[in-house]
Image (tube, coloured by chain):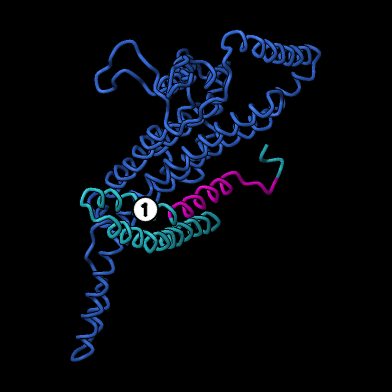
Amino acid sequence: MAKKKPGVDMKNAVWVLAVGSQIGLSIALPVVLGLAVGYWIDTRLGSLPWITLLLTLIGTIVGPILAYRWAISTVKRRFEEQSNKES
Amino acid sequence: MQKIFSTLRTPKGCLGCLGILILTLALAVGGLMVGGVVNKSYHLPEISLAAEGIPLPFEIPLFGHSVPNTLPATWLSMLVLIVVAFFATRKMELVPSGLQNAVEAIVEMFYNFVEGVAGERARIFFPLVATFFFFILISNWMGILPGYGSFGVWEEHEGQLVLIPFFRSANAHLSTTIALAIVSVGATQYFGFKLLGKPFLNRYFTFKGSPKKEEAAAGGLARLVGKLGGIMERVGNAFAGILELISEFIKILSFSFRLFGNIFAGEVLLIVVSFLCAFLASLPFMALEIFVGFVQALIFSMLSLVFFMIATAHHD
């Protein structure tokens, strides 16, 4: 099927889908994780807003950094592999 | 693929298709009539985020009196995979035919896919990645089968009769997907250690700076600045290691939430659409669910593969 219709490369399509969704989630999830862990610690210690706020803030800072680092390294590797295959 | 279509075009194939269509309609009408007889108090089904517990007459240690209804579904999809694998490999022939031929074709297709991404390391990663793919694919597709979510026991819950289905699509339970994600992330560490050895730990715990910068500084103030820069670099690298460590935990979450969210949303979508209009309206959504199930299985295995590749890449 794929041979007859040029233009749709399954491997690249799935790769873009997978990496894209992973980048999106790696921005969003640290915030949620910080919120959950902070709330859990706060309910244990009885210091309600502070640790939750702090960890959520850390999550919002860490998330984009993670996404950036991961996207750069993964895409770079991908380009290197493709140029290795072509040469 | 073409062979299937050409068989469908013959009179026999047309008759078969018509028969299946009539049977489906008859079942739908029959279900509509019988449904009113079996249970008169008719209300909308409960949609619950957590998997419902099937009540048991006896107690299982650690589980209590109920078992989540994704458990039978998981076992059923495992059973399908095991039975197919068993019958496909029972009489292995050099020139395959029948079931062996079909299974070999599918496995080979997926192997080529993995090889295209992983290259020569495909042989190491293929068994785990293929297991992920086929398990998720089969359980996603089996979740659309009739009987999943509609066949169960009625139970009193907060003064209302609620249907507790015996089967629920295996990946519509966060525990299943978290288990899959933990296996995937754990396997990343395992493959990293296996192929790289001890240097693999440098990803997470590193205090090394690049030696060039410290040597380049000659003396006096320049040397002090160089040393300070080196220390700054070490701290930065240590911080990057902590980030890597955090990202492993984020990976478990993102793996599990993506799969769970997609499959659970599909279940809810099908329930809502089929209660808005019982006939034919849910058909395109079922096609969509088949597609989503396939894509999610592919994405899960593809991402696992990408992470395996990154973990086993040689850093210099």
Q: Secondary structure at mark 1?
A: loop
Determine the residue positioned at 28% across, 66% down: B237
Q: Label 1: which residue?
A: B313
Q: Residue furthest bottom?
A: B220
Q: Position of residue B316 (x, y in %)?
A: 32, 62
Q: Position of residue A71 (x, y in %)?
A: 46, 59
Q: Which is more toward the observer, B84 or B121? A: B84
Determine the residue positioned at 41% across, 62% down: A69
Q: Is residue B312 visible?
A: no
Judged by its main secondary structure, the magenta piece is helix
* Above/below status of B270 relative to B30: below
Is residue A8 shown in magenta?
A: yes
Q: Position of residue B55 (x, y in %)?
A: 37, 16
Q: Which chain is blue?
A: B
* Above/below status of A29 relative to B10: below
Please report the bounds of the magenta region as a residue range: A6-26
